[in-house]
Amino acid sequence: MRKLAIIYLIFFTISTTLTLFLVYKDVNHPFATAMVIGYVVFLIGSLLYFLIAILWKVRRLPRQELKSRAGRFILYFLIFFGLSFLINFSEPDLYKSISIAFGMSLGLSFFDLVLLPKKPGREV
């Protein structure tokens, strides 16, 4: 992995742990509120960066690899949507099920384009 990706993952892990601790213990301190707001901004910024980076690198992929990734995305989406729907069968929430399935399948299908180094045979 690239050094920047390692730093990002360490920062993400530490900030997630700290935010979960602050929320779980219900800390009422101005720093705690600022930390949680900063964490939300960090997550939104990360989401936007990953989407833009994925779109930027997908356009250079060979057609065959893009086709296999799209097929994997659809398969993961259907699996996660089905599981989420089955788990919440008594009270289905389609918005929640679709958003979870979309995020999980997008991450599993395309995360290596953003965080992992280039493969020798791939030009992206």
Image (tube, helix red, strand yellow):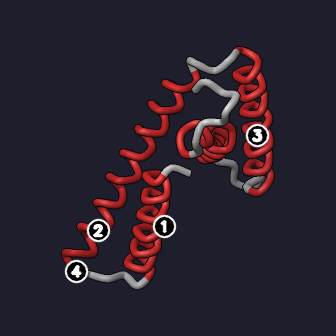
**Can you tell which mark lies on residue 29?**
4
Q: Is residue 99 visible?
A: no
For the C terminus, the quadrant is top right
The residue tagged 2 is 35
Closer-to-camera residue (30/11): 11
Which is nearer the N-term, disc 1 or disc 4? 1
Report the residue marked by disc 1: 13
Earlier along the polypeptide chain: callout 2 or callout 1?
1
Q: Secondary structure at mark 2?
A: helix
Residue type highlighted by circle 2: Met
Q: If you read the primary sequence from the N terminus, does the residue marked by circle 3 or circle 4 appear first? A: 4
Q: Nearer the viewer, residue 42 or 85?
A: 42
Residue identifier under label 3: 76
Q: Is residue 65 above or below residue 88?
A: above
Q: Is residue 57 visible?
A: yes
Foreground mark, 2 or 1, reads 1
Report the Cα–Cα distance between label 2 and label 1.
14 Å
Task: Write the residue at 41% across / 39% down.
Answer: 49
